[in-house]
Structures are given as structure tokens and as C-alpha cells.
Image (spheres, rainbow, N blue to C red):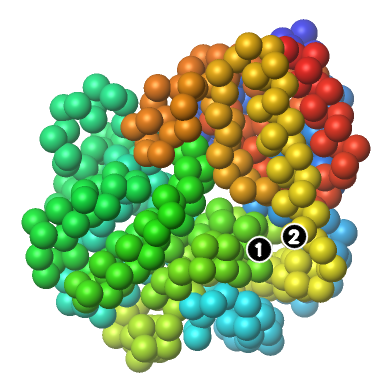
Amino acid sequence: MRRKTRGSRERFEKASHSLSGGVSSGLRRSARPYPLYFSHGKGAHLQDVDGNSYLDYTLGWGPNILGNAPDEVIESIQREMTRGLTFGAQHDLEFEVAEILTRTIPCADRVCFANSGTEIVQVALRLARAVTRRRKFLKFEGHYHGWDDTVLLSYHPSLEKLAACDGNPIHEGHGQLPADHTVIAQWNDVEGVQSAFAENDGEIAAVICEPMMCNSGCIPPQPGFLEFLREMTSSHGALLIFDEVITGFRLGLAGAQGFYGVLPDLATYAKAVGAGVPLSVLAGRQAYMDYIERGEVVHAGTLNGNLVALAAARAALHTLTNTPDIYADLFRRGETLRSGIARILKKHGHKVCTAGAGPVFHVCFIDRQPETYRDLLHADGQKYSDFVLALLDEGVLPLPDGRWYLSTAHSDEDIEATLEAVERVC
């Protein structure tokens, strides 16, 4: 692989002299043999600066639901760019996209826009604190809600740190403020959540979760667990927040809310809703969103609702809403790929588990299906890293953390070619 990617290595070395860490997001440094540099992409394919072509299952870490550089999105952006990039004022796209979202998202009476998942989660938590007049919130180990100090806690701690923490929040790095208002529980642990509410009686403003723990193993909720969270928050006067940054418009038009049939009070979106451009959305019931409308909760941002982002969203949402069988095909191909990878690896003697649903799933080398983040820590991470490195040499590009994303641009032939590459790797 190193012989084929000399241009990437040279660029990474050059970038390291001026760009902190040589990358624009710290998570990208984990790539082997080093972060690759890409020149362009189209549909299900990416090409690096050395001319190597890859079947792309990273999809920009999730946003590219329609594939790389989808024509309908590019054309929509180009049309709007002739009018301007951002006004810092109102325009028709704001209510046009908002109307699509309120028709589509089950919990959405109203929406508001920002630019990243991290931003919009902070708006949701601020709103929950204002509504309940409480300061604490509960999150789960392994769930990712952005890089703000308040939520970058107990995301990917080691077994050693977990053993030493005594259930307290674990910081992911230095410089973070004290975690005074964050309560931690384990995913799928009913008794743990009950204990957390009992120990913080009348103090928890909200429970926030990825309805499927996509950032850590794509571990689904156990049957009845989301319904339990809905009941617990309602009975204790707290809000339920679904972080649908990944699941939104990927598990279907109604996201995880439609997929699991549970309605939160608020939900956050990013990634697929922008189809590759920076855009995030908070959706919620009018009684709560009115706090923003009345100015009692501050929601601000110079680039909120800019023309480029909303032009992309309008085109993407139109395609996802009006293309027959688009999600049926996504799920069919995703399940074919997921089951095929597992079948081939097991045939060659590897202990492997997969989890997820259709357009987003996770592969790990482990002997039993993980149900919590702590279960996932027993997987053979080195073997998976070697697997990814070997796939790169075969022209297949997955994420280094075990996640695989599918787009509407992936074809049956792409899935077949990928499984043939997995067979060769084994």
C-alpha cells in the first residue's frame, strides 16, 4: 500500500509542518498506513492523488447519502451560488426546507438550522435546561454527541479508565471543563438508568442518546429500551432527545423515530440531511421550540441557513422523498454486503459480529454480539485494522473504526465486487 500511495505520504508530511496534526479532524489520524489524500469522487467511488480508485464506504464519515458529488445537489448549489453564498438574512429556501422537514420528521412541529452536529446538540441541551429549569442531563457510554466539553465524556474510554472511574464521567482529553452536570449510564441498562434518576431525583433535564449507537459498534437498543427511556423521561419531567446526526435520513425518511416507532421531544440532525455540505437541524415539538421563538433561549449563528447548505438539503430531500424504492434498495444492498462480509470471514475461521441496519453497519472481530460499549472493548481491534489495510490494497475504502456506510450510488455490482475483494483479502 505504501508503494501505491507515495503522493499521500508526501502531502501528509508536508501538511504536518503547518496544519496541527497534519489533519483537519483528529479522528482522521488513525488511518493506516497514514491519512490518504483524495483528488475527486463521483458516485460510489473516490480517487486518491496517486490515481488509485476506491469503492467508498466512508462517504465523508456519513454525509454523502447520495454518493460523492451527486448531480442534483451540485446543480442546486450552483444555481443558488449565482445569487450569493450567505445573506445573514432571510430567503425562501429557509421555509421551503423547513416545510419539508416538518412534513417528514415525526417529532417536528418546528425546526431551526445550524452548521454542525456539535452546535445543534448544544442548542437542544440548552433548550431542555430552559424548559425544565434543571441543569443535569444523562448520556450513555460510547455515544458521541460532538466535541463540546459538556458531551465529550465517556465516549471511548479504555477498560482501565472505566474500572477506575466508579461510574463518573470520563474526559476524552485535557483542557475540558469539569463534568458537573453530566450523568453517565450504560446503553441498554434499564436498572442503571433507573438508578441514575433515583440518585439525581428532580435534577435531570434530559436524556440524550443515539437511538442506534452508531458511533460505537452500531449497537441497537434492546427491545423495549427506547420505549423505557420515553416512559422514564415523561414520568420524571425530563425531555428525551434523539441524536439522529447519523440515523436521520439514513434509516429512512423518518429516521430512527420511524424505524423504531418511538417519538422523542427533540431530535438533532446533520450528515445526510446536507448530503455533503455543513448543515444541522434541531427538530421538536412547538411547546419547546417556542422558547427559541420567544427569545428565551438563544439560538444564533452567522452562517445558519445559508444558501449553499439549504440548496443542497432541498435537492437531497427531494431525491430521497421522490425516488421510488430508494430506501428499499439501500437496505437490500446494505444487508447483502453486511451478511456477505460476515459469511466470508466466518468461512475462513474468523470470529466476527456485525450490527446495524442496511445503510449503516459495523463489523468487528469478536465472539459474541456486543450489547454495550464495554462489550465492544473486547473486540480484536488490531485484526480489524489489518483487515481495513488489506482492503485498501484491493480498492475498497471503509472507515477505520468498523463502520460501513452505503449510499444510493452503490450498485449491486459494487457490492459483488466488494465481497470478491473481501474473499481475496481472507
Instruction: Mark yes or no: residue 26 visible.
Output: no
Whether residue 379 sits left or right of residue 106 in the image: it is left
Residue drawn at (77%, 58%) of the image:
328
Q: Along the line of sight, which residue is nearer the eye, 80 or 328?
A: 328
Residue under circle 1?
252
Quadrant location, the C terminus: top right
Give the camera-side residue of 350 and 142. Answer: 350
Q: Which residue is mark 2?
A: 327
Q: Is residue 353 visible?
A: yes
Quarter of the picture containing the N terminus is top right
- Closest to the observer: 33 or 166? 166
Query: Which amino acid lies under the numbered mark 1 shown in the image of this protein?
Result: Gly
Q: Amino acid at mark 2?
A: Tyr
150 or 262, nearer to the observer: 262
Pointers 2 and 1 in contact (CB under 8 A)?
Answer: yes
Q: Is residue 54 left or right of residue 212?
A: right
Q: Position of residue 5 (x, y in %)?
A: 75, 17
- Identify the residue at horizontal 75%, vertical 14% (top origin): 425
